[in-house]
Amino acid sequence: MARRANKKRPAEHAKPSASLAAAKRQVPPPPATIPAARAWLIVQHWSPVYSYLLIAALTCACLLPFSGRAFHIDDTLFVWSAQHIVHDPFNPFGFRLNWDQVELPMYQITKNPPLTCYFIALIGSIAGWSERALHLSFLLWSLIVALGTYSLAKRFTDFPLVAALATVLTPAFLVSASSVMCDTMMLALWIVAAILWLEGLEPLKPHYLLASGLLIGAATLTKYFGAALIPLLLVYSFRKQKRFTSGLLFLLLPIAIIIGYQFWTKALYGQGLVLDAAQFATTHREKVQVAVLSTGLVSISFLGGCVLPALTLAPFIWRGRQIVVTIVLSAAVALTIILGAIDGIPHVVGFELVQQAVESHWLLLTPQFTLCFAAGLSILAASIADYWREQSAESLFLLLWVLGTFVFAAYLNWTVNARSILPLVPAAGILLARRLSLKSSASPQSIVRKAFIPLFASGAIALWITVADAQLANSAKTAAAILHRDVQGRTPGTLFFEGHWGFQYYMEAYGARPVDVTNFQFKPGDIFVVAENNADVIPIKTEFIAGGQGTEIELDGPKGATTANSKMGAGFYSAHWGPLPFVFGPIPPEHYLVYALTNPPQQGGSAVN
């Protein structure tokens, strides 16, 4: 939003005479105004440099403790692709991998473009492939997101620091920034591209628009959702300038980059990977058969859980009656979803067990779904109300940023997850800051009281969730080490396993082999391990188990909260696991089932159900 021009002071407000000013100096201010005056003095001398330093320090303080976190979820895919790129830089996905219980070419498995993998390859070849080296390198992108949000927010609100903190102190940002996946890098490129475009539009600065176009292309080659910035900036520019201008031609540059990547990958792999990713999402959604209504409701709960400041700031940006109505509505929706009156779990393998688990914990999950859903409604309502009130290009930009990302996460992506919600977090932070300034008095002490305490409350909860996610990741690494020491090292046979994510990365590092259900070849004496709380886990037939049963290894997992547990309805990385991005409560430990194998199946047969 353009800054308002300073109005000239009317004559009746002219500077008082010296005698009158001296008389006023003799009257001491009331005691109650002295703290306010001091607070105002502090804020008057608070420069943007201090805000940048505060944001950078806070971001580092939140993320550095997780720099040694084990690789988790799709970190594995990015690291393996990067290691391949070091040896074959012009063929990023030219290797084979068993990721879905069958070995396939990597280009058929991955649904993300390779720019993040190239960045990891650069860092890995220089600093090594340790978790700490890679996590520290990704701190760069997190800082760009945090500082870039502050810079961008200065165009939209008088309180950009609030917007930046509302971005950083969220579960979506802190958990995603603790990974080495593509999400934070894409968002960093997105924000810088948006800043350059808005700066270069009026007055026209072609070199800014050129740089923005290149960055949009880079964002898209980091994660395909980066291309959504093209129509967003197109609509904003046309609304801002009321006409088509030559500057809009620079948006053809990222389109050319995307088309070039499509043809390049088609020449490499026989299929263009841009359209392949779109086809995968469409096909998968047709298979899971979840109603439009239930998908939208679950997506709203993910939205609110990922942007917790919308919940903690609610008493300061909405009226009491609005909050009560929203909570009552949210509670009704929560009971409907949790108790299965509306089918909110995608119809994948085992979805009945997920629904049963969610229903069995209805007393624990209903209040949490209620609060997350209410926070999600708050964000959607804030974006709509902001545009309704302002009717400006800036408010339209924020509205489309939020609603466009939400629609993609809910209805276009292959699954609802927090990683797809992440791109709208900066826009939500800006909207919350605009809403707070609208509902608050202009005094700085009021803003401090009404914004920073709720924001740091959100940050404390977000850190708890980030700790829980790190504990889950580290438990898989620990399990792989224990299985190597106590099982693999004491048997002459081969160690097979089911389960992917970081567990697969560390198991394969120890020489274990993932199960291939299309060609399961083993001999008596081999060992079969099942990571219970993991993806693509299918029970083994008892006829192939020596003694008909196995042993169980139990490890401590997350404490008091979890981001991925189908028994608790937590599905941060996929709503297939539950209708909430995270869950607080008594989290069950992590279990690994170990079976000694016997009676090999017939050639071409399978040992799993």
Image (cartoon, grey):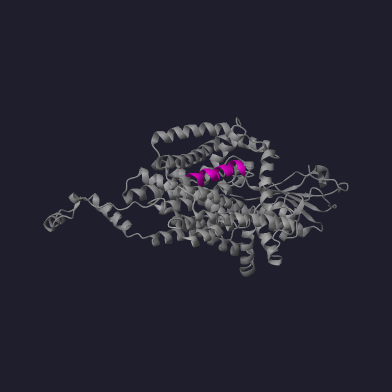
- Residue 109 % position (x, y): 71, 52
Magenta highlight: main SS: helix
Residue 545 horizontal side relative to residue 422, left or right = right
Residue 514 is situated, as x and y percent measured from the top left of the image, at 75, 53
Q: Which residue, as the protein is rendered here, is positioned at the far left? A: 19
Q: Who is closer to the viewer here, 395 or 57?
A: 395
| Spot occupied by residue 577 in the image (x, y as percentages of width and height) | 63, 42
Image quarter (top left, top right, bottom left or bottom right) of the C terminus: top right
**Was residue 408 drawn as part of the magenta stretch in this picture?**
yes
Tell me which segment is drawn in magenta: 399-412
Q: Is residue 170 visible?
A: no
**Camera-side residue of 284 and 243:** 243
Q: Position of residue 295 (x, y in %)?
A: 59, 37
- Residue 509 quadrant: bottom right
Number of marks in the rendered image: 0
Front in this rendered view, residue 90 or 579? 90
Above or below 499: residue 510: below
Q: Is residue 490 visible?
A: yes
Front position in the image: 339 or 245: 245
Q: Can you name the residue that lies furthest to the right here?
A: 602
- The residue under the point 50% across, 49% down is 425
Q: Residue at x 57, y 37 (%)?
A: 296
Q: Residue at x 51, y 38 (%)?
A: 373
The quadrant in which residue 588 appears is: top right
Asked if the stretch drawn in magenta spans residue 200, the answer is no
Does 89 sit left or right of 363 as displayed? right
Q: Which residue sits furthest top?
A: 341
